[in-house]
Amino acid sequence: MRILSVDDSPATRHFIKKAIDVLGFDFLEAEDGKEGLEVLERENGRIDLILLDRHMPKMDGMEMLDAVKSNEHYKHIPVTMVTVELERDEIHKAMDKGAKNYLIKPFTQENLIGKIMESLEMEL
């Protein structure tokens, strides 16, 4: 399994990487939506899950979600939005645009692993 974390916070990406390492999955990262799309292109869409932050510079999470879900090569990739609790209306917008799941910051490693497995439709 290959998971792409798109988040402008290096600390958040590091925390996510540690959880993905526990699962034994491959970790890819990007610091904004523009770089996230570049990673998707470079990897030829061979990504199993995108963990996507909502607020980022250059291209935010909603813009990247739109780009992923409107692209024939990438629209099958499940996207889990990673957002702060105060943005519940944003969560609903993201789900309407095709996000499969969401994770509210701050989160524990157990919450993260649970959401990853749920998004991949896998059992622990």
Image (cartoon, rainbow, N blue to C red):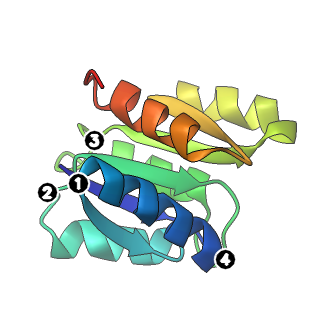
Q: Earlier in the sequence, mark 2 or mark 1?
A: 1
Mark 1 near mark 4, Cβ–Cβ under 8 Å? no
* Relative side of 89 to 110, left or right: right
Characterize the local packing of mark 2: few (<14), some (14-19) or many (20 or more) Cα atoms within 10 angstroms.
some
Between the residue at mark 4 and the residue at mark 3, the CA separation in whole angstroms equals: 23 Å
Q: Position of residue 8 (x, y in %)?
A: 62, 74
Q: Earlier in the sequence, mark 1 or mark 4?
A: 1
Characterize the local packing of mark 4: few (<14), some (14-19) or many (20 or more) Cα atoms within 10 angstroms.
few
Which of discs 3 and 1 lies nearer the camera? The answer is 1
Between the residue at mark 2 and the residue at mark 3, the CA separation in whole angstroms equals: 12 Å
Q: Secondary structure at mark 4?
A: loop
Task: Residue at 51% x, 53% y: name it.
Answer: 52
Q: Secondary structure at mark 1?
A: loop
Q: Amino acid at mark 1?
A: Phe
Q: Earlier in the sequence, mark 3 or mark 1?
A: 1
Q: Which residue is mark 4?
A: 57
Q: Which residue is mark 1?
A: 25
Of residue 71 and residue 41, the one placed in the foreground of this image is 41
Which of discs 1 and 4 lies nearer the camera? The answer is 1
Q: Position of residue 1 (x, y in %)?
A: 17, 49
Mark number displayed over residue 46 = 2
Of residue 5 and residue 60, the one placed in the foreground of this image is 5
Mark number displayed over residue 75 = 3
Mark 2 near mark 4, Cβ–Cβ under 8 Å? no
Task: Residue at 57% x, 34% y: name it.
Answer: 102
Q: Earlier in the sequence, mark 4 or mark 3?
A: 4
Is residue 98 among what the camera can see? no
Mark number displayed over residue 112 = none
Q: Secondary structure at mark 3?
A: loop
